[in-house]
Image (spheres, grey):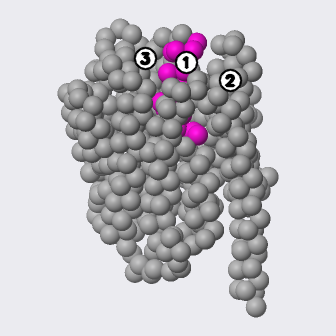
Amino acid sequence: MKKLYNGYLDNFKGLSKEIWLLSLVTFINRAGAMVIPFLSLYLVNEKGFTFPQVGWIMTSYGLGSLIGTWIGGKLTDSIGFYKVIVLSLFFGGLGFIGIQFLDSFIGLCIGIFGLILVADSYRPAIFVACDAYSKPKNVTRSIALIRLAINLGFSIGPMIGGLIIAKISYTSLFWIDGITCVIASALLFVVLKPKKIVESVTKDPVVIEGKSPYQNGLYLLLIVIMIFSSVMFVQYFSVIPLYYEKAHFLSEDLIGLLLFLNGAIIVIFEMPLVGWLERINISKTMATFWGMVFLALSFIVLNLSEWSGVLVIGMILMTIGEMIGSPFSNALALEMAPKGRKGSYMGLYSMSFSISHIIGHNGGMNLVDKFGFDFTWYVIFAVLVVVSIMTLWLHRRYKKSVTFKVLKKAT
C-alpha cells in the first residue's frame, strides 16, 4: 500500500510552483461552477422553456465561447496570459451573479452569450500558462494537474449544487459561482504578481516561427476531430442531465452524485494513468484515439438496458475516455504549435470546443425532441466511430511528418 501511495505521489513530482498555484486557483473557480451542469434543468424546470428553446440558449453559450476563446487567444499573445486569466475570472464572476435576473428567452440568449464570451477567454490563456511554467517533458502532466484541479472542483461543485437545489433554490448557484470566480481572480492576483510573470516570460525576445494555425493542414485535421468529438461530449452538459431526469427519473441531488463520480474518478486515477501511459511511450495521437473509443462506448451502453445501473457504467466509460484523451490531445495541440504562435494555436484549439457548444446542444436537444433519447445515442455512437477512424488517419500522417522533420535535421 505504501508503495502504491509513493508511486501515486511520484506522478506529481517535478511540477513547478506556478503550476500548483494555477491549479489551486482553478480548483476554487471550478468548485463554484455549479451552474453549468444544471443549466439545462434550470431552463426547463425553473424558466419553463422547451427543449428547442434550451438548445438555442445553449447555442448562444457556444457562440460566446467561440468568440471568447478567439479573443482570449489573441489577447494572450498580445498582453500575456496573466492579465487574460485575472480579468476573465473577475468579470465572469460578476456575469454569473447578474445572469439570474434575466427571464426572457432573448434576454437569456444575449446574457449567456456575453457571460461565456468573458469566461471562456480564460481557456487558451491557461494552456499557454501550462506551457510557460513547465519543462517540455512535464507539459502533459502539468495539463493533467490543471485538469485534476478542474475535476476536483467540478466533482465537489455539482454534488453540493444538487443538494443546494434540493434544499434551497437554483438561483443560489449563480451567487456561489459568481463569488468563487471573483475569489479565484483575487487569489491569482495575490499569489502571482504580474511583474514576476512578465520577467519570466519575456526574458528572451519573442520569435514567431512556423505557419499560422489556419495554414497548418495537420493541425486543422486535429481541430476537425476535436470539433466532432466535442459535439458529442457536450451532451453530458445538457442532454444527459435531462435524460437522467426524464428517462430514469433521477432527482437533482442524484444527478449531482453521478457527476461527482466523474470528477472523483479523474481526481484519483488521471495522474497515475497519464504517468503510466507516458512511461509506456504511447503517442499523443493514439491516446487521443482511445479517448474517442471509450467516449463512443459510454453512449451506446445507455441503449443496452433500461436498468439505471447503465448510467454509472456509461459515466465510468466516458470518464476513462476523458482521462486518456483530453490531456494528450491538449499536449498534442501544444506540441504542434510553433514558437511565438502558441496563443493563436491554443485559441483555435479552444475554439473547437466553443463550436461544439454551438452545434452540440442545439442538435442534441432537437434530436431528442423529434426522435427520442435512444435514437440520439445511436447517432452519437456512429459519429464517434467515424471520428475514431479520422484520428487513426491523423496518427499516421503526423508520425510521417515528425519522422520527415527528424531526417531533415539529421541531413
Residue name at image x 51 percent, y 15 percent: 245
Element under disc 1: helix
Residue name at image x 30 percent, y 48 percent: 118
Q: Nearer the viewer, residue 158 or 137?
A: 158
Q: Which residues are magenta?
A: 232-248
Residue name at image x 35 percent, y 8 percent: 167
Q: Is residue 175 magenta?
A: no
Q: Position of residue 18 (x, y in %)?
A: 44, 53
Three-letter amino acid code at disc 2?
A: Leu
Distance from the alpha carbon under mark 1 to that under mark 3? 13 Å
Three-letter amino acid code at disc 3?
A: Gly
Q: Position of residue 87 (x, y in %)?
A: 26, 51
Tag on residue 244?
1
**Dividing the picture into quarters, in which one does residue 140 lie?**
bottom right
Is label 1 or label 3 in front? 1
- Name which of mark 1 and mark 3 comes first in the sequence: 3
The residue to which callout 2 is attached is 302
Three-letter amino acid code at disc 1?
A: Tyr
The residue to which callout 3 is attached is 162
Q: Position of residue 274 (x, y in %)?
A: 67, 46
Distance from the alpha carbon under mark 3 to that under mark 2? 23 Å
Q: Position of residue 349 (x, y in %)?
A: 51, 58
Looking at this view, name the residue that lies furthest to the bottom: 411
